[in-house]
Image (cartoon, helix red, strand yellow):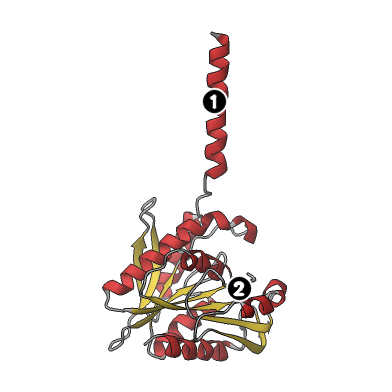
Amino acid sequence: MKKNMLLSLMAGLAALFALAAFAEPAADYTREKKWADEVVPGLVVGDPVYLQTPRGHHKFLTLFTPVAGTNKAAIVVHGMGIHPDWGMVGTLRTELADRGFATLSIQMPILAADARGEAYPPTFPEAAERLAEAVDFLKAKGYTQLAIVSHSMGSRMSHVYLAGKPDAAVNSWASLGIPLDNYKAVKLPILDLYGDNDLPPVLANAGKRKQSLAARDSKQVRIARADHFFSGREAEMAAAVADFLNATLK
């Protein structure tokens, strides 16, 4: 009797540890709401649109800037711990719209403000779901030629989505400031854009990333005197992305 109880207890503990090992830490939805409460009232360009993930049914903020007379749109993906109108991300979403591309800048999963980059990979599955929802939204609005424009941690998240089975409407990817060393799993045209004063991992892996660019119209561009956030070089950043989108979205 005692032996059976002990075995049952051990089996229960094993199941609990297995669930804990595979459990994904929840994104900080409270922090997301705080960002949304700050961003939405001050929004000048674009409209706030809330989309919903199929898993967990979490609603997340997106900023939609439609452009009439075009079927081309860009999904703009921010980096670690920020929001869809932050700094260079806000510049990208508005500048690309001014250049004829509808934009949907989306809130990605974030963790606590003190979370380090290595804590983020468990949030990548939800990030991929958000990208899929963004694609569906733009297609429903009549945009059939789509690109993903992502920065830093947002590029790592986008890589997960694009290395899987991305929607056929997604035709290219502008990847800014990514620290990874190759794009071999992604079959789309890729713009690898970074600054010559970028973060050490971005610079160290630039050569390997360039060698892995296989699809037609893929290219690597380095912007002189630009840091990881393209501070003071936002115009060159936006121009490089727009030129790439013009070449890859028909």
Q: Residue furthest top?
A: 1
Label 1 packing within 10 angstroms: few (<14), some (14-19), many (20+) = few
Identify which residue is drawn at 47% across, 55% down. 29
The answer to whether residue 116 is visible is no
Which residue does the image show at 35% across and 55% down from the upper left? 54
**SS at circle 1:** helix
Find residue 147 and name its label: none
Q: Quadrant of the rendered structure where residue 234 is? A: bottom right
Q: Residue 126: x and y, percent?
A: 46, 57
Disc nearest the viewer among 2 and 1: 1
Comes first in the chain, label 2 or label 1: 1
Q: Work out whether residue 117 or residue 247 is closer to the camera in this orientation and state it.
A: 247
**Could you give the CA–CA distance between mark 2 and mark 1, rounded to whole angstroms?**
43 Å
Residue sitting nearer the eye, 181 or 178: 181
Marks 2 and 1 close (CB-CB < 8 Å): no
What residue lies at 58% left-to-right and 17% top-to-bottom? 6
Residue 124 in view (yes/no):
yes
* Residue 105: x %, y % from top left: 43, 74
Q: Which residue is mark 2?
A: 178
Q: Position of residue 96 (x, y in %)?
A: 44, 86
From the image, tell me which residue sits under label 1. 11
Three-letter code, disc 2: Ile
Closer-to-camera residue (13/169):
169
162 relative position to 142: left or right: right
Disc 1 residue type? Ala
- Disc 2 is placed on an element classified as loop
Tally of numbered discs: 2
Q: In the image, is residue 23 above or below residue 51?
A: above
- Which quadrant holds the C terminus? bottom left
Q: Residue at x 48, y 91 (%)?
A: 243
Taking 47 as reference, is 19 above or below it? above
Pick whichever, 37 or 111, lies toward us.
111
